[in-house]
Amino acid sequence: MLYSSAQDWRTAQHRKVLVFGMSGLGKTHLSGLLRGSGEWFHYSIDYRIGTRYLGEAIVDNAKAEAMKVPFLRDLLLSDSIYIASNITFENLSPVATWLGKPGDVARGGLAMAEYARRQGAFRDAEIAALKDTAHFADRAQALYGYDHFICDTGGSICEWVNPEDPDDPLLKALSEECLLVWIKGDAQHTQELVRRFDKAPKPMAYQPAFLARVWGEYLNRNNLQESDVDPDDFIRWTYAQALAHRQPRYEAMAKWGVTITPDDIGALRCEADFVELIAQRMSPN
């Protein structure tokens, strides 16, 4: 690990961490807490994806929808209005909206071929944003004078790495730059994530083999054609399977760093609490 011991971590002049885990367990909340101390730079992978790597595609998608409305079409063509994406650390809806859901176009779905294309573009964008971590860690210190750095990753990071391979190029680069911190949820947290997702299903990024498998299973078990699929029903059905698919991958990634819980995060009140929490997790039992 980047820090050889709890004491090494406590006394480090520059602390750098990368948090990972399922969306909704506290990554961005923790990042905001540390950013609020004034000592930590918050690098959001999803924000980087939406502003740097998919920014043009996201805006073009919104323009394409606007062009379907005659009133907006005339205004766009005459340069009377412009469309922009207002992405923030807390509001990443433009990214999710662009990623979309597969199924019946009349119910807001995308053809699977287009959905798969966007999934591939998102994968490339997320990997590129993760590779930018070292650049932003250096930039945060050199340009802004931040002593500490937190990389707030998306839930799909586990889809693009092989944590069982000690030479996985992406994980190796990230672990050399930051202390990897897994936010591990329990069964109760998982139940709450499923409940929230069922209430408001959101697009997700999947490993291609996993997506192909669950798509085929869904069509077969429901005797449906692609154009008959209810997009929200499909991603609801897929979500619980995605949680189960990702859990062992997160667990394997955890061996590269330390593990904390959402309850640990909920108990934090200041930066010093976080520093001590990580030190405790690094100490031998």
Image (cartoon, rainbow, N blue to C red):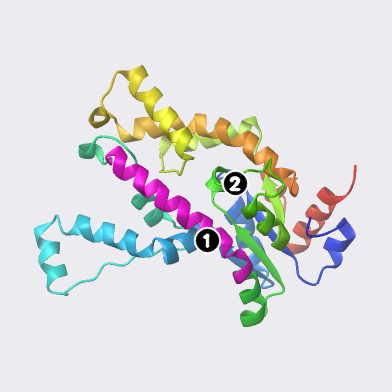
| Residue 48 drawn at (x, y percent) | 49, 63
Q: Nearer the viewer, residue 132 or 78?
A: 132
Mark 2: amino acid: Val
Residue for point 72% across, 74% down: 147
Q: Which mark is residue 109?
A: none
Q: Main secondary structure of the magenta part?
A: helix
User: Which region of the structure is painted magenta?
Assistant: 109-135
In the rendered image, the vertical position of residue 74 relative to residue 248, given as above or below = below
Marks 2 and 1, how far apart in space?
14 Å
Picture coordinates of residue 93, whole percent (x, y): 40, 54
Q: Residue at x 30, y 45 (%)?
A: 114
Q: Pointer 2: what residue?
A: 161
Residue 117 versus residue 194: which sits nearer the camera?
A: 117
Classify residue 238 by image quadrant: top left
Position of 74 with respect to 34 (left or right) is left
Q: Is residue 20 left or right of residue 176?
A: left
Q: Quadrant of residue 219?
A: top left
Quadrant the N terminus occupies: bottom right
- The residue pinned by badge 1 equals 129
Q: Earlier in the sequence, mark 2 or mark 1?
A: 1
Residue 70 is one of the magenta-drawn residues: no
